Image: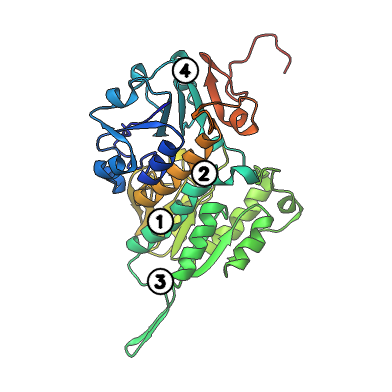
Amino acid sequence: MKIAVPAEVDLGEPRVAATPDTVKRLVTLGATVAVETGAGLKSGIIDADYEAAGATIAASAHDALAGADVVLKVRRPTTAELPDYKAGALVLAIMDPYGNEDALKALADAGLATFAMEMMPRITRAQVMDVLSSQANLAGYRAVIDASSEFGRALPMMMTAAGTVPAARCFIMGAGVAGLQAIATARRLGAVVTATDVRPAAKEQVESLGAKFVAVEDEEFKQAETAAGYAKPMSAEYQAKQAALVAEHIKKQDMVITTALIPGRPAPKLVTAAMVASMKPGSVIIDLAVERGGNVEGAVPGEVAQVNGVKIVGHLNTAGRIAASASQLYAKNLYAFLETMIDKQAKALAVKWDDELVKATLLTRDSAVVHPNFAPKVEGAVQ
């Protein structure tokens, strides 16, 4: 079986889908691995490192993909890339399927079996394959580093002969994986940290990290979590009460980091223009949801906007801003999933199509979009 690792064609994507460590493991499982030359450079991995691990270096994506049974990528293949893919090949990547029906159809038409890593179920056996968690964890860390670099003051309290520098106040909005890492990082840097989330289970997690929890804790709040652990959309009444509480709290903050995302939906607006206007000049807001429409009014994807002296940071692909670490974790996520599809005795692909992990992530197969969330609806079918 041949596994291909092409370079990412998106110039804003510095991550790579395999590391020398995962290449070595794949070779041990009986695979031949072809890595496009330069694929790992932006993650600090040179071609010689891949060669030392047992990979062959291909001069182009065309050469790497020729005859490949499995393709490992960070982002979904573009339509321009598809002619080089072998029909029937397995493709593992972050597929971003919501709202991209035409792209899914193109993958199906190419005859590929594609797997969306971000749709991995959050169950115990899949923890090592959880791309959302591994990348969000790093994004939460990087968000604090970005905020501190944009903030014109020190984060910890400093007592000097010349006077005392007060600790910066940092407010984290959304206490999922990214938010919790942001809390931990801001605390380590010495900031006074508060956080909010609509999921009741988050309160204990926030407080266990030494931060203060801020939320309207009414009956709706107590029921605001899905069985999968995601936040439910809240009623307009609750949103108004929470917004009033946040508006008062945010005036006193030096840094705000927003992380709220609901899969398949636009990012909820958490910080209004009025809230931004109420903050002190020199304050910094990091919007980690800017690629999904943003949590902050005034956030501009890929830019640092300034509103009355307040910086609104809209960096794209925040995890990719620490590409070496992000690639290391992402490659291990991919390897852990692909390993379940390989017969170790025969050293050949043996996909268990009825496995719950496969069914949860499989988007296209046999020239059709097969995932129930994205498959075309049949007219007259009972819903």
Q: How many marks?
A: 4
Mark 2 and mark 4: Cα distance apart in space: 26 Å
Q: CB under 8 Å between callouts 2 and 3?
A: no
Please name the amino acid that badge 3 sits on.
Leu
Badge 4 crowding class, 10 Å Cα cut-off, few under 14, some 14 to 19, many 20 or more, is some
Q: Position of residue 203 (x, y in %)?
A: 65, 61
Q: CB under 8 Å between callouts 2 and 4?
A: no
Which residue is at the far top?
Answer: 380
Which label lies toward us, 3 or 1? 1
Residue 64 appears in the rendering: yes
Report the disc number at residue 205.
none
Task: Name which of mark 2 and mark 4 comes first in the sequence.
Answer: 4
Mark 1 and mark 4: Cα distance apart in space: 38 Å
Report the disc number at residue 88.
4
Please name the amino acid that badge 4 sits on.
Gly
- Dot 3 corresponds to which residue? 155
Q: Establish if 279 lies above or below 336.
A: below
Please name the amino acid that badge 1 sits on.
Arg
Task: Name which of mark 2 and mark 3 comes first in the sequence.
Answer: 2
Which residue is at the far right?
Answer: 219
- Dot 1 corresponds to which residue? 142
Q: CB under 8 Å between callouts 1 and 2?
A: no
Residues 366 and 94: in front is: 366
Which label lies toward us, 2 or 4? 4
Residues 163 and 205: in front is: 205
Judged left or right of residue 216, residue 196 is left
**Residue at figure coordinates x 62%, y 67% from the top left:** 207
Q: Position of residue 14 (x, y in %)?
A: 32, 42
**Residue at figure coordinates x 36%, y 20% from the top left:** 67
Report the disc number at residue 132.
2
Mark 1: secondary structure: helix
